[in-house]
Every structure is written in structure tokens, then in C-alpha cells.
């Protein structure tokens, strides 16, 4: 049986306040379960640029939550990508590939009926063996660095 302390909430100011009743992440043992992130900025503004730009910002947000939980998105073991339109798969995948090294995390891509954005991404991240914050957060010329 798990003690109440075995589940620790993780929130990151770099991501902004959750938009509902959830934590940015929950750490259980050596795994960090990260809630879905969209291309939002800390002030709550949602970027509505290209799918690639939305993927980049959502991954930045996930990395910020992972760092707050003692890891980095580069330690992801599973990622789920939710796309408004599966016709955007190639654009999403091209951007996604630039943020992860081999071995790539397991991934599932799911179509969703979003109306306010095109992409949401969640992840499960390993906390042990952290090798630094990694950097799926390469600088975005449209937004500046969010590291």
C-alpha cells in the first residue's frame, strides 16, 4: 500500500497556473506523470501559430513541468500527442523529432476535436538517472527563450 506522501504534486510557474482542477504533474516513485500541455504562455495566452510552433511551445511547457519535478523531458518514456487534424501529422512529427534523441520515447498520436488550439501533448518521464535538463527547448525566434 502506498503512503499518502508517495504521490507528490508538481507545478511550474514557467507554465502558468493550471486551467482546471489538476497538477502539472504527479511524481510517483521514479516516474513523473505530466498533464497535457498546449502552446500556452505563462500568462495563459495560447499561441495559434503553425502546428510546429504549437508543438515546440507545448514541449517547452512539458519540459518546464519535468524540471520542476526533478527531471527533464529528454527522459520521457512515453509521450501522447493529441492533434486536431491528423493531416498535420507530418508537420508535428518533423518538429517533434528535433526535440528527442534515441532511444525515442514510446508515442501515441490521437485525433481530438479541439477548437481553441491544434496540439496537446502529455508525457511520462523517468526521474532517476537525470542527465541534465536536456533541451527540447531550443530557442524559438518568434518567442525568445523560455528556459
Image: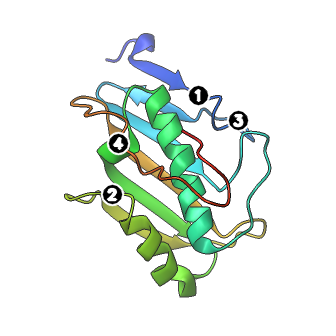
Q: Secondary structure at mark 1?
A: loop
Structural crowding at the residue carrying mark 3, measured as other residues with C-alpha within 10 Å and reported as few (<14), some (14–19) or many (≥20)? some
Q: Secondary structure at mark 2?
A: loop
Looking at the image, tell me whether mark 4 or mark 2 is earlier in sequence order: 2
Give above or below for 83 relative to 6: below
Residue at 72 percent across and 39 percent down: it is 42
Q: Secondary structure at mark 3?
A: loop
Give above or below for 76 relative to 23: below
Q: Is residue 39 left or right of residue 83?
A: right
State if disc 3 and disc 1 touch (CB < 8 Å): no
- Cα–Cα gap, marks 2 and 1: 23 Å
Report which residue position mark 4 lands on: 134
Q: Position of residue 128 (x, y in %)?
A: 24, 28
Report which residue position mark 2 lands on: 100
Q: Position of residue 8 (x, y in %)?
A: 47, 20
Looking at the image, tell me whether mark 2 or mark 1 is earlier in sequence order: 1
Q: If the image is split into quadrants, where does the C terminus sit?
A: top right
Q: Is residue 27 left or right of residue 117?
A: left
Q: Nearer the viewer, mark 2 or mark 1?
A: 2
- Cα–Cα gap, marks 2 and 3: 24 Å
Report which residue position mark 1 lands on: 11
Structural crowding at the residue carrying mark 1, measured as other residues with C-alpha within 10 Å and reported as few (<14), some (14–19) or many (≥20)? many
- Cα–Cα gap, marks 1 and 3: 9 Å
Looking at the image, tell me whether mark 3 or mark 4 is earlier in sequence order: 3
Report which residue position mark 3 lands on: 16
Looking at the image, tell me whether mark 2 or mark 3 is earlier in sequence order: 3
- Cα–Cα gap, marks 4 and 2: 9 Å
Q: Quadrant of residue 118?
A: bottom right
Q: Nearer the viewer, residue 35 or 94?
A: 94
Residue at 37 percent across and 27 percent down: it is 28
Q: Nearer the viewer, mark 3 or mark 4?
A: 4
Q: Secondary structure at mark 4?
A: loop
Amino acid at each position: 500500500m502506498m503512503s499518502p506522501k508517495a504521490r507528490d504534486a508538481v507545478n511550474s510557474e514557467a507554465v502558468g497556473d493550471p486551467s482546471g482542477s489538476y497538477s502539472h504533474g504527479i511524481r510517483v516513485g521514479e516516474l513523473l506523470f505530466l498533464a497535457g500541455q498546449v502552446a500556452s504562455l505563462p500568462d495563459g495566452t495560447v499561441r495559434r501559430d503553425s502546428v510546429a510552433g504549437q508543438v515546440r511551445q507545448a514541449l517547452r511547457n512539458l519540459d518546464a513541468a519535468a524540471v520542476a519535478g526533478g527531471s527533464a523531458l529528454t527522459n520521457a518514456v512515453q509521450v501522447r500527442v493529441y492533434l486536431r487534424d491528423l493531416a498535420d501529422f507530418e508537420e508535428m512529427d518533423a518538429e517533434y523529432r528535433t526535440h528527442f534523441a534515441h532511444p525515442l520515447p514510446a508515442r501515441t498520436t490521437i485525433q481530438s476535436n479541439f477548437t481553441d488550439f491544434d496540439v496537446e501533448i502529455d508525457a511520462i518521464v523517468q526521474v532517476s538517472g537525470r542527465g541534465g535538463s536536456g533541451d527540447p527547448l531550443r530557442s524559438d525566434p518568434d518567442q525568445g527563450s523560455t528556459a
